[in-house]
Amino acid sequence: MRMLKPVAVPLIAVGLALGIGAIILAVSGANPIEAYGALIDGSLSSQKTVGRTLEKATPLIMGGLAVALAFRAGLFNIGGQGQLVVGGIFSAAVGFGFEGLPWIIHAPMALAVGALAGAAWGSIAGILKATRGAHEVITTIMLNFVALNLTDWLASNPWKDEGILSRTPAVEESALIPLWGSFPTGFLVAVAASIGCWYLLERTNLGFEIRSVGLNGDAARYAGISVQRIIIATMAISGLLAGAGGAIETQGVIGRYEPGFNAGLGFNGITIALLARNHPLGVIPAALLIGAMEAGGSMMQFNADVAPEITDIIEALMLLFVATPIVVRWFFSRQEAAEVSVTAGWGSS
Amino acid sequence: MPDHLLPLDSPTAVSDPVGVAAPPALEVRGVTKRFGDVLANEDVDFRIERGRVHALLGENGAGKSTLVNIIFGLYQADTGEVRRNGEVVNLNGPRDAIAQQIGMVHQHFQLVPVLSVAENVVLGDEPTRHGVVDLGEAAAVVQRLSERFGLDIDPQSIVEDLPIGIQQRVEILRALYREVDILILDEPTAVLTPQETGHLLEVLRGLADTGVAVVFITHKLREVMAVADEITVMRRGRVVGHTVPADTDESDLASMMVGRPVELRLKRTPASPGDKMLAIVDLVVNDDRQTQALNGINLDVRAGEVVGVAGVEGNGQRELVEAVTGLRGVISGSIILDGEEIAGRPPRQISTMGVAHIPEDREKLGLIGAHTVADNMVLNRYHHRPYSRHGIRRPAAVDDEATRLVEEFDVRPPNIAAMVATLSGGNKQKVVAAREFSHESKVMVAAQPTRGIDIGNIEFIHRRLIEYRDAGMAILLVSAELDEVLGVSDRVAVIYGGRIVSCEPAEGIDRDRVGRLMLSGADG
């Protein structure tokens, strides 16, 4: 177990998932090599596909950070989805609601308002937990439903575009987060957010307080840390990250808010955080991996005639293996057992 | 080794009431047991004789529990043998040990709280009639055993209603019911009040007189001297001495346990108390179930004195400590720190105003195990300069302070980057003590400051308490160890049922009277 370095478990989990995925592919009648070839083709083969991978990874990084940061304070934020859609629609509102602003003001403003809306949404669960003791898993799930219905209503009533579709108007061009060639600029924001989260946790007093509360709430209280304040602050920052993820998606990919378009993005954050073992920098490779699978999944579907659900299955398997390290540990223990049997033969016992 | 400590293989080392020819009830020869890299027992020899009380003495981690667990079949020795009445036996589990009439009372009782005494005693080996458990017969058997060994227990009582000392007797009864003639007790007095300890020692004496071989593990020297017929001392997995009480004294035993001379009696000068630093006035505090735990207590601590609070646990000590440090709200009354009211203020404010706190539970409250030693050294000051500026931490400053404290308090290993969870209990406590003493506070609230740590570290912490007292700190010491309270304090307050029932100078205090006050709130 000494060799069980933090990186090993996710790597083995990914390997196992891809291996079992290959078997499933073979059983379903596809050629696994061809299928995985198409997957790589669709995600990494050209500037355009790499750009797509980065674009897919961007909201995953933000959602993953939201879950990972909350987890470091001992909180399980299931509400990433709700915080994301709230952030998305508010950034859209700023995006289409103001005209004639220069890009340098308009885009950051829309992003900031979306992030703050997510923060506000996340802090509701924090306040409920800190003041009433309501468990954040329950409240964030409930708030997801509220958020989804609220944004649906906003997109089909006060903020509805002309026409029959329930969606907001397109945001002004000045509010878009542009592509730089085929490189999505929003990805830089997400990477900056990862580094920012790392800095927050490791180098600031607030981060020390968050980690202390997550590791031992009683000792944190003894040390004079207000656990309530940290719970609220953490949920707000967590919501801020998810909300910013929704804003980037709105301003950088979709160009408006459309109900249902972001489905599942917030929940994928849980997968990412688990793969990253709640490390803010680990979130980046984890999100790139899942992003690549999503970007390449359609290529796999067309070129290798593989059902799109297969990529979901492989993602689910990764999650399963990361969440149940016992499977991975079994590999290690077999390895150790093999080592022991080698030395035992020398009569050294 | 002092000359009265005879070599282990000397036939005169122990008197042999049965005669030289008869083998001992149980003998352990050359036992070695390894756990990974740790040598828990190394070439251990150990003899248990019928009708004698054998104290197994040693610090935490000396290998005592490993040895008795091997005798009770919970562990198997890597090498060496266990002989019962001269015959080599294989003990592959407690079942084998019980079949060999070996019984054990664990430190944590293995009783079913909601069952009666009789049910607990017969559990697993019930008397039956027509295939149905015969509880009447069980109660009768338990009654007979209880009378025969002077244990004084009602077989019908429900275990969870009984005090700890009586629950322990139920454990002993359970072993006796299985007709053991070797009874092992693992730290039996750790959980008992002084009175209960006295009763237990009488019971053990009585058991030995009926021919049972009694082995009890302890690190309390007073008990060893009071009841043991023989004493085996272990240190770092090895047996380092074997003697009888007549040939030794407490300070010899302590030196053997620790491996160097130890001052058992704290060297101390009389206190020179100054101004009133902490004044607790008519303080009423509730416990977690919102029932009153402190019923209006009054207590003062002056600069330069140690006030010890003695009491059986659960009489309001925890609530007192938590109220003074701000961890618990106050219903009424006041707590005055150097002229300023602190009752009901948040912990951080109280800490900043000058109250340091060594909490009773260092694992749960005092430390964050997954943080480094360095981070734990500044656990409640990380937000002050120079450890941070404008909310940004300054690891170099934290490391400097931690390095200084680790050296000053002799924390081992001296590695400030190690996770605190990897340290031993004594070293964890040194981290807590180092942090709290370094505040230069006006008042130190020390709750069970030496619980579960070695003699060497106890000595160290006690000396520090006195040093800081002499430097003018006001120290409120709360401890369940009467010896500690009496040895360190200048004044002793006894708490009973949420009231201070007595408060008097420690000089010349009557130990037995304090014990009675702790137990009943009155000295009659």
Image (spheres, coloured by chain):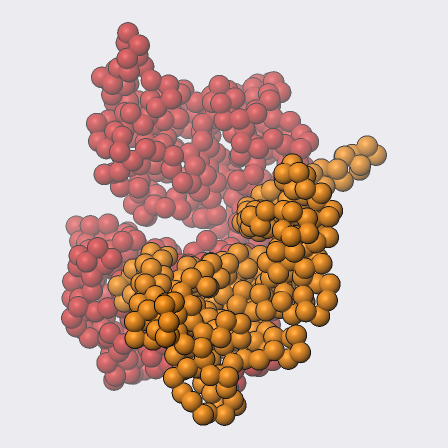
Chain colours: A orange, B red
Residue A315 visible? The answer is yes
Residue B242, horizontal then vertical, whole percent: 58, 40
Q: Residue at x 68, y 42 (%)?
A: A30
To which quarter of the image does residue B410 belong? bottom right
Q: Residue at x 55, y 59 (%)?
A: A272
Residue farthest toward the right in the current orientation of the protein? A346
Residue A156, horizontal then vertical, whole percent: 33, 69
User: Eyeballing the image, is B304 above or below B283?
Assistant: below
For this view, does B135 lie left or right of residue B266? left
For this view, does B23 lie left or right of residue B517? right
Residue B42, horizontal then vertical, whole percent: 66, 40
Q: Residue at x 71, y 43 (%)?
A: A31
For this view, does B17 lie left or right of residue B444? right
Counting the numbered discs, the total is: 0
Residue B179, horizontal then vertical, whole percent: 40, 20
Residue in the foreground of this view, choosing between A236 and A181: A181
Q: Residue at x 43, y 22 (%)?
A: B180
- Image quarter where the C terminus of chain A lies is top right
Residue A151 visible? The answer is no
Residue in the foreground of this view, choosing between B475 and A112: A112
User: Eyeballing the image, is B241 above or below A273?
Assistant: above
To which quarter of the image does residue B12 belong? top right
Residue in the foreground of this view, choosing between B182 and B243: B182
User: Eyeballing the image, is A57 above or below B114?
Assistant: below
